Image: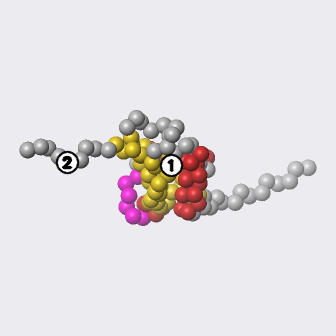
């Protein structure tokens, strides 16, 4: 005789939008000449602090050097603030929630630019 299935507890996980700045580190996979990068990330967690901790740990495992993390809140918080959130972005957020994972949605490398401007 099998026991009846227990009702599944609603997940307390939410997805948070994070902007992470990374510096250079051997094996980081950034383009030649880049001084670092900004990563737009969707990360699941029971709160934003957990999402940040998990993200930093995963980025360190991936041989990157996280320098700074800015949190932009959960999907609900961003909607309340009137952020325009595309269907593609919502899909990535849902994937992060479904997989209890960290999704890098965008990577923008930084390059040093020559100081000064036009001569003359």
Residue wearing tag 2:
116
Counting every numbered tag in the picture gives 2
Percent position of residue 38, x then y: 41, 48
> Would residue 96 be seen by someone viewing this image from the given angle?
no
- Residue at 55%, 63% in the rendered image: 49
Give the main secondary structure, helix, strand or loop, of the magenta stretch: loop
Q: Are marks 1 and 2 in contact (CB under 8 Å)?
A: no
SS type, badge 1: strand
Circle number at residue 65: 1
Was residue 83 drawn as part of the magenta stretch in this picture?
A: yes
- Residue 39 vertical placement versus 32 (above, below): below
Q: Check disc 1: other Cα within 10 Å, few if <14, some if 14-19, many if 20+.
A: many
Percent position of residue 88, x then y: 44, 44
| Span highlighted in magenta in the image | 80-85
- Residue 87 vertical placement versus 16 (above, below): above
- Residue at 71%, 57% in the rendered image: 8
């Amino acid at each position: 005789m099998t026991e009846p299935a227990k009702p599944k507890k609603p997940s307390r996980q939410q997805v948070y939008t994070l902007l992470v700045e990374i510096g250079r580190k051997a094996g980081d996979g950034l383009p030649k000449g880049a001084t670092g990068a900004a990563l737009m990330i969707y990360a699941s967690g029971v709160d934003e602090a957990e999402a940040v901790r998990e993200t930093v740990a995963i980025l360190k495992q991936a041989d990157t050097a996280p320098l700074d993390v800015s949190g932009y809140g959960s999907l609900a918080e961003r909607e309340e603030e009137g952020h325009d959130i595309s269907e593609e972005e919502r899909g990535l957020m849902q994937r992060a929630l479904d997989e209890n994972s960290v999704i890098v949605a965008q990577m923008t490398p930084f390059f040093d630019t020559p100081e000064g401007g036009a001569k003359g």
